[in-house]
Amino acid sequence: MSWNAPRRLALLLVAVPAACARPVPVPPGTTAYALEGGRWFDGEGFASRTMYVLGDVLHERSPERIDSTIDLSGRWIVPPYGDAHTHNLDGGFRLEEMREAYRAEGTFYVQVLTNTTRGAAAVRDSFARRGTLDVRYANGGFTSTLGHPFLAYEPRAIGIFSQAALEARAAALCASRRQLGNAYWFVDDASDLERVWSEWLRGGPDVLKIFLLHSERFRPDTSCALLHPEGPEAVAEQRGLDPALVPAIVERAHAAGIPVWAHVESAHDVAVAVRAGVDGLAHIPGYQLRPRDPTAPYEIDADVAALAGQRGVAVTPTLIVGDTFAGPDSTGARRQLRRRTLERLREAGARIVVGSDAYGRTAGPEVEALRALGLWDNLALLRMWAVTTPQVIFPDRRIGRLADGYEASLLALECDPLTAWDCTARISLTIKDGLLLAIEPRDRSSSGRP
């Protein structure tokens, strides 16, 4: 249901005095409790009110029976946060560590772009229960032969962990396919797409990740030279899909009810992806811009930005991972390019969302990097992290709002995040799917950062 539908219903009920409203029936075996005294985020600010939880759903009317009451006085209530672009939670390695890190941060909605199909299968059941993280998996992404993310997965599969080892064993690496059909799929033409599609679907993906890397200069090439076109430095100069295949891939995915996210590097990649109808862009062009790089290949055209806005395309800027790979922004060109790109996309109506794109890191540091750009105030950042990002990850769920009929998941903060941003980290109480997960000692000795 859209945001407007509940509001239309609220308008119909506004004339009915609260005392006359019938209590909400409580089904047998369902726990009902009241949440009193908190200031609740409504998308524009905070308002004091009492809400009720029946099972795993929020209600504005009192239930017929209240089993207990939780006092939220002096707390600011917000929806849980989201991370729309990560590679964590892929199999059992560091699973509990990252699960706890997300939970402590208040991030409960996670989209993994990409992961190994076998890794997702091994851990999905651990998230298929009430009160834990909600996770969507892309499984292996679609690329061309030897294209990205081949070098992100295959070297480790055959025991290559250094640049020297990669160079010494380049021929063996080129011939290796241990992660094919698991972490990546090679789609070089329409017949490949036809051949791999059913098998990819059998892995139970929630979303499709496709890879475009400077598609303006794409050329068919399955030789080992692709790995070292200009020497060791060029190992990262990889490629992705033939851009001519992207519309057919997106059409097929959408016919199966599967959203599509595109890894993009250049403005041309963005144009290809947006015109083909993708749902999300995993990066912005030039996110890894180096001081010596020209900015022209990364400047998004106004018409492409307008189309992205018209279609509600979501975008994870992934600022920190870009800085990690590209090094210091010594000239400031990267920051300025990012600002121009994000301003253009935002003004056109594209949805900027949070995505960490990192192993071993949650969403919080990426939010701080976005905040440092100075493009959003605290209200806009809170909406991005707690409203838009979760709703982009799970578009068919009633999440990201604290309203009647929505899922009973929330964070209680110790101070107002609109006046002090680090209040978003000062979580003293967490409810997920109607379950009370944590109440920590309240510490009012420190104030938040504005």
Image (cartoon, rainbow, N blue to C red):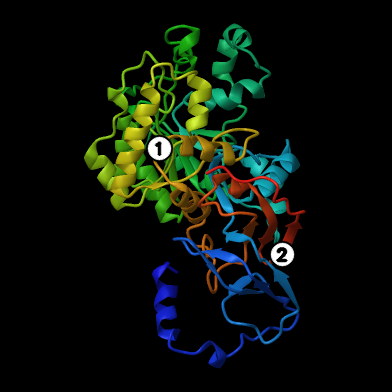
Q: Amino acid at mark 2?
A: Leu
Question: Disc 2 designates what residue?
Answer: 435
Residue at 71 percent of width and 64 percent of height: 435
Q: Which mark is residue 79?
A: none
Name the quadrant of the N terminus. bottom left
Residue 266's image quarter? top left
- Name the element at disc 2: strand
State whether residue 271 appears in this view: yes
From the image, state whether disc 1 or disc 2 is nearer to you.
2
Question: Disc 1 designates what residue?
Answer: 191
- Name the element at disc 1: helix
Residue at 57 percent of width and 73 percent of height: 49
Q: Nearer the viewer, residue 193 or 47?
A: 47
Q: Residue furthest bottom?
A: 20
The relative height of residue 336 versus residue 440 in the rendered view (above or below) is above
Decide which of tag 1 and tag 2 comes sooner along the chain.
1
Q: Amino acid at mark 1?
A: Ser
Percent from the top left, x then y, of residue 9? 43, 80
Relative to 144, is 310 on the left or the right?
left
Q: Nearer the viewer, residue 62 or 271?
A: 62
Q: Nearer the viewer, residue 449 or 376?
A: 449
Relative to 360, is 234 on the left or the right?
left
State whether residue 276 appears in this view: no
Mark 1 is surrounded, within 10 Å at the Cα level, by few (under 14), some (14 to 19) or many (20 or more) other residues, namely few
Q: Residue furthest left?
A: 303
Mark 2 is surrounded, within 10 Å at the Cα level, by few (under 14), some (14 to 19) or many (20 or more) other residues, namely some
